[in-house]
Image: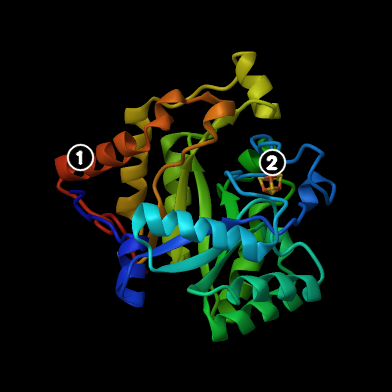
Amino acid sequence: MRRKAFNLYSTHLKQRFGGRVHKLSVDAGFGCPNRQGGRDAHGCLFCAPGGSGAVSIERNQSIALQLERSKQLMRRKYRAKWFIAYFQPFSNTFGPLAKLRHCYDQALAVEDVVGLAIGTRPDCLPPETLDLLAEYHQQTYLWLEIGLQTMHNRSLDFLQRGHDYRCFLDAYRQAKERGVRVCVHLILGLPGESREDILATAAEMARLKVDGVKLHLLHVLQGTPLGELYQQGQVPMLEMQEYVELAVDFIERLPPETLIQRLTGDGPRDILLAPLWSMDKWEVLNAIDDELRLRGSKQGDKYQSG
Ligand code: SF4
């Protein structure tokens, strides 16, 4: 049994909805501005051909059908009762408002879908889109998931993200002004980032009091520009224990109320080049628990408010 020395999202969902809630990934067909508006061009250095967070989704089916099929699976596997439709791959606010509304409404019309999680980039959140999200925030349980990865502009440049930290700050501020819950995606172990750099990002997330974070480790995937650099020996990777210690350092610096939505990642196995240790997700999660236990610490222990 994992000790909960941090504010776990799944526990929060269970308490809020009174039963097991599972996120179901859905691909609504959006493109990405960093892939020349489509899906085929290269975008961020690490992004898989099928989009970041590419998972086994039946992409050519309607939103409703994708959700219905995953629902049956998750009911059998995890006895999930309720579901959150997670618009995951590519940039799910990149489109005209009518299309966004149409997609989100289709998901909410599926039985037992109690909320939405919408993954996107900071430069895909103009005021009118944020107004729309604020509307959904009023009517359902909504999370806006913004891919940031790091607060350091030199790393954002290296990753070819196509936006800077200021862009994130503007989008974040405007989302919070509208009351929208925000989860920030971050990558630990970026080439050229020291422990101090990573902890500076943690301190910044703490300063902003973000509602949730997803911590990812850097995955190197085949078919990506990062994969090519890796094969040329130009991408140093973290060992598992290094990642575990950084993740714990990060958690300790977050406010106790920030929801931890993810502590590691499991990249698509068929195209994963490194780190191969990440394939055993439970080993990583257990090692994080062990590290917290060993330190006798918990989320918030090194949080500096003010
Ligand atoms: S913003 Fe997301 S979908 Fe677009 S290229 Fe980067 S990681 Fe891929």
* Lower position in the chain sequence, tag 2 or tag 1: 2
Query: Where does residue 233 sit, x and y in percent of width and height?
Result: 59, 14
The image shows a total of numbered marks equal to: 2
Query: Where does residue 159 sit, x and y in percent of width and height?
Result: 66, 38
Q: Which residue is drawn at 14% across and 47% down?
A: 296
**Residue 15 occupies quadrant:** bottom left
As drawn, 28 above or below 151: below
Query: Where does residue 27 sit, x and y in percent of width and height?
Result: 66, 55
Residue 290 circle label: 1
Q: How crowded is mark 2: few (under 14 residues within 10 Å), some or many (20 or more)?
A: few
Q: Which residue lies furthest to the top in this view?
A: 232
Query: Where does residue 218 sit, x and y in percent of width and height?
Result: 52, 35
Nearer to us of marks 2 and 1 is 2
Q: Is mark 1 on a helix, strand or loop?
A: helix
Marks 2/1 in contact by CB < 8 Å: the verdict is: no
Q: Which residue is drawn at 77% across and 37% down?
A: 42
Q: In this view, does 15 lie to the left or right of 66?
A: left
Q: Residue at x 36, y 28 (%)?
A: 240
Q: Quadrant of the C terminus?
A: bottom left
Q: Nearer the viewer, residue 15 or 234?
A: 15
Q: Which residue is identified by label 2?
A: 50
Q: In this view, does 71 lie to the left or right of 146?
A: left
Residue 206 circle label: none
The amino acid beneath tag 1 is Asp
The amino acid beneath tag 2 is Gly
Q: How crowded is mark 1: few (under 14 residues within 10 Å), some or many (20 or more)?
A: some
Q: Can residue 143 be seen in this view?
A: no
**Residue 207 occupies quadrant:** bottom left
As drawn, 234 above or below 204: above
Q: Which of 26 and 70 is in front in this view?
A: 70
Q: Can residue 135 be seen in this view?
A: yes
